[in-house]
Amino acid sequence: MAAHDSPRRPAPGRDDADPTAPLLQPAATEGENEQGHTNKPKGLLQNLREFYEKNFGLFLVFLAQFFASTMIMTTKLLETGFETKFHALQIIFVRMFSTSIIGSLWMMYKGVPGFPFGPRGVRRLLVIRGTAGTIGLFGLYYSLSYLDMSDATVITFLVPTLTAFVCWVALHEPFTVKEALAGLLAFGGVLFIARPPYLFPSQEGDDSQENQSLTTDVYSFINIDRQGGIVPPEKASPAERAMAIACAILGAFAAATAYATIRVIGKRAHSLVSVNYFAVLGSFSSFAIIMIHPDLQFEIPHTVTQWLLLVFIGISGFLLQVLLTEGLQREKAGRATNLIYTQMIWALVFERIVWGTTPPITSFIGSGLIISGAVWISLQKKAPETPKGQTADEENRTPGAGEQQSRS
């Protein structure tokens, strides 16, 4: 009697892979075999590969900040760099609509649980999260119409302080004296960036002779030529600048509310569902406001450059999410958070190349105070590692957000 062959198990394929596994896999080292055992070291090449594997997550987070800054730069160019100027709401619509399409298709393909509406018990919270996230994004994008890239970027670093405050008020979580002092330090930095006339009476906007003299002396010392740039910079009046600062702070507060809501939702809803609520609500709300408001309308790009910039907003936003998610899955949140601040470096570089400008000394002082406050907040609690499979969205690039979101 012939023996029956035992049924063969099919070879594992893509469908059998862990759906939460990182998309971007670093190359395996020569010193490891298939069972994960380490062989004898192989010299310089082996050391380089080990360094690559150890810091691959940091490299992805670094790239994510590059694309975050390029998205902000592209937004400012569309708002101020052409004769046809795009309103912040239209850019939000383009950005969020593309994200919602890509996110929905991905969740359908992966069979994400709870897609598209999420569990019944958290749907209201998801709506609050999406609405607050949209307001936060609008505050940032609107402020770019009148603020320098670096000033608008650094105000987003208020979010950790505001998140701690919102969690204290709404969730009754601890809010220590040190966190309050860090918040005062950060808001003191905002005053240096805003430069209100009643606190800086010698200045008239950005063009006071005293401020320009001091700034020019410093730039001459470090050998910076302030002339030149691809696009001429936009001049904002003190009133316009004050309004932009107010919108940026409102956006930071809304983003903090979104983080607090995510904290309440916890693991009851998939992170991709949360991101999709943000994208869909942002798309619908921006579209509705543009259609209803009598002074707003959809602008059609008139040049190839404008079309390319609009497309690039969607691409850079998608790459930001992918790279940040992949980087945080591989790296401890503490080390990754430190690289978030490289976004300020990118902002200064792009500002110099595209507009030929460098912020005044008061903006550097204010930026230092805000970043110091954000770092102080992030050091109050040990930052937990981001769970494998957690998806970072555009908001989650902010330092300290992960710590606040993951508190229990």
Image: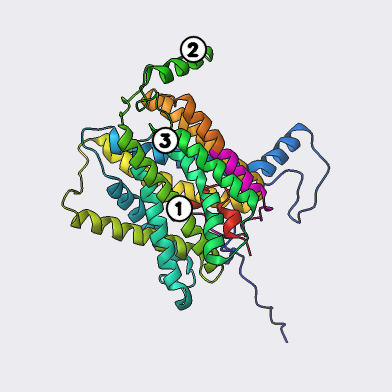
Q: Residues within 10 Å of mark 1 (few under 14, many from 20)?
A: many
State the residue at coordinates (52%, 65%).
170
Residue 240 x, y percent position in the rendering: 31, 37
- Nearer the observer, 47 or 273: 273
Q: Tell me the residue that label 2 is attached to.
A: 220
Amino acid of disc 3: Ala
Circle 1 — which element? helix
| 300 falls in the magenta region | no
The residue beneath circle 3 is 194
User: Residue 232 location in percent, x, y?
Assistant: 31, 24
Q: Magenta stretch?
A: 370-393
Q: Tag 1 or tag 2, which sits nearer the N-term?
A: 2
* Disc 1 residue type (three-letter): Phe
Residue 382 is a magenta residue: yes
| Residue in the picture at 56% in, 68% down | 267
Q: Secondary structure at mark 3?
A: helix
Instruction: Report the Cα–Cα distance between label 2 and label 1.
Output: 38 Å
